[in-house]
Amino acid sequence: MNSNLIKVINQHKETIKISMTLKAECQYFTQLLFKAFYDSDTNSEQALEELETLFVSVRDKACPQVKGKACKRWSDFKDQIPDLYESLRKDAEAIYNNDPASQSIEEIYLAYPGFFTISIYRMARVFYKLNLPLIPRLMTEYAHSITGIDIHPGANIGASFFIDHGTGVVIGETTEVHDNVKIYQGVTLGALTVKKEYQNSKRHPTIAKNVTIYANATILGGDTIIGENSVIGGNTWLTKSVPENSIVTHNHQVEIFSKAKKIR
């Protein structure tokens, strides 16, 4: 009985060929990368050396066909670090300047799930643009597991991005978010139709600059464009474009109980 079971398990493993070590290493790689960027107690030089070793390990597991070849190098990422710092500085400032509850920039770096997830997204985005499989997705899924914020590394997000609270936010692969956009918890920027044949098409919306999207709004479709300076109210459902300077709200129905009615 056991020999038959082991045979079935091994046949299945041969079919899918995944390494859970890759997932664990990517999580540690992501943690160390964030600490190398921001933790004053982490020796950045030592961390970068360890990260290079880790990068080679996860790269070779994710795409074994390039093992030992001089391509998709750690230096390709390292060269982007100054620009990443500048971009993330703008994100942190956007959160600090827009959230009246924030007391300091240090608080943003330490305590804000939105900033943590945006940081990991922007780091993963570099690897995504290098056409590395699995690694960027594993990085953003690690952030997702911690914060509840799901940003696909394929999404194209502009400067000074602000996510407040963040739980339940979903941003799909072909989403475009321009500069100075603010979104709140529960917002979905998703696909209107989910079919495999649309894999290589733009399935998710475009959010123009200076847009605010309040909690639990859902905006769907690759042809959907939210115009500049617009405000999308909470619980709104949109599948069509709106022009710039729009205010879109969900219409609530208010009913006043009469004395004859009982509240159950």
Image: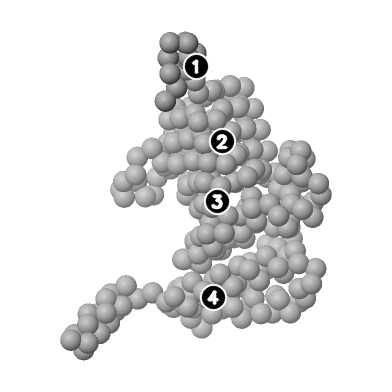
- Do the CB atoms of the residues marked 1 and 4 lie less than 8 Å apart? no
- Do the CB atoms of the residues marked 3 and 1 lie less than 8 Å apart? no
Q: Which of the pair 149/51 is nearer the observer?
A: 149
- Do the CB atoms of the residues marked 3 and 2 lie less than 8 Å apart? no
Image mark for residue 254: 1
Q: Which dot, 1 or 4, sits closer to the camera?
A: 1
Say which quarter of the image contains residue 177.
Answer: top right
In three-dimensional space, the C-alpha distance between marks 3 and 2, rounded to whole angstroms, equals: 13 Å
Rendering coords of residue 101 (x, y %): 75, 41
Q: Of marks 3 and 2, which one's residue comes earlier in the chain?
A: 3
Above or below: residue 119 compared with residue 40: above
Say which quarter of the image contains residue 159.
Answer: top right
Question: According to the image, label 4 marks what residue?
Answer: 25
In three-dimensional space, the C-alpha distance between marks 1 and 4, rounded to whole angstroms, equals: 53 Å
Answer with left or right where residue 82 lies relative to residue 254: right
Rendering coords of residue 104 (x, y %): 81, 49
In three-dimensional space, the C-alpha distance between marks 2 and 4, rounded to whole angstroms, equals: 34 Å
- Could you classify mark 3 by the number of other residues whose Cα lies within 10 Å: few (under 14), some (14-19), or many (20 or more)? many
